[in-house]
Image: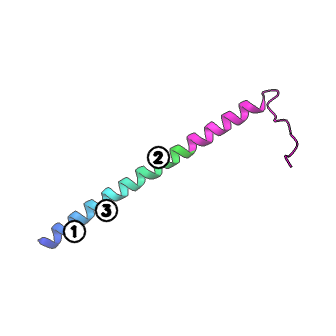
Amino acid sequence: MYEYELQQLRTADLIRRAEHARLVREAARARRAARGETARNSAEHESHIRGFRRTRSARAA
């Protein structure tokens, strides 16, 4: 009976760990998607603004 209870505890622990890992992956995927969307929007927006380019200056000696 003792082994069965240990097995139940291990199983429950593995299920909790798997759920946590899944949530971590989902959060990372959502952050990457949001960061990519922000980058696409800002790059698209800035590319249509006139005078956005930097002027080149001479290198300091």
Q: Work out how far the residue at label 3 is from the one at label 2, CA to CA, in angstroms.
A: 20 Å
Instruction: Mark 1 or mark 3: name the one nearer the start of the chain.
Output: 1
Q: Which quadrant would residue 16 be assigned to in this image? A: bottom left
Q: CA distance from mark 2 to mark 1?
A: 30 Å
Mark 3 Cα shell of 10 Å, populated few (<14), some (14-19), many (≥20): few
Asked where in the image residue 13 lies, by quadrant, the reply is bottom left
Badge 1 element: helix
Q: Which residues are magenta?
A: 33-61
Of 61 and 32, the residue lying toward us: 61
- Residue beneath disc 3: 14
Sequence-wise, which precedes: disc 3 or disc 2?
3
23 left or right, relative to 40: left
Vertically, is 47 above or below 15?
above
Left or right position of 33 against 49: left
- Residue corresponding to mark 2: 27
Question: Which mark, residue 7?
Answer: 1
Q: Is residue 3 above or below residue 50?
A: below
> Residue 54 colored magenta?
yes
In the structure shown, which secondary structural element does the residue marked by tag 3 occupy?
Answer: helix
Question: Which amino acid does the dot numbered 2 rest on?
Answer: Ala
Asked if labels 1 and 2 touch by Cβ distance under 8 angstroms, the answer is no
Secondary structure at badge 2 equals helix
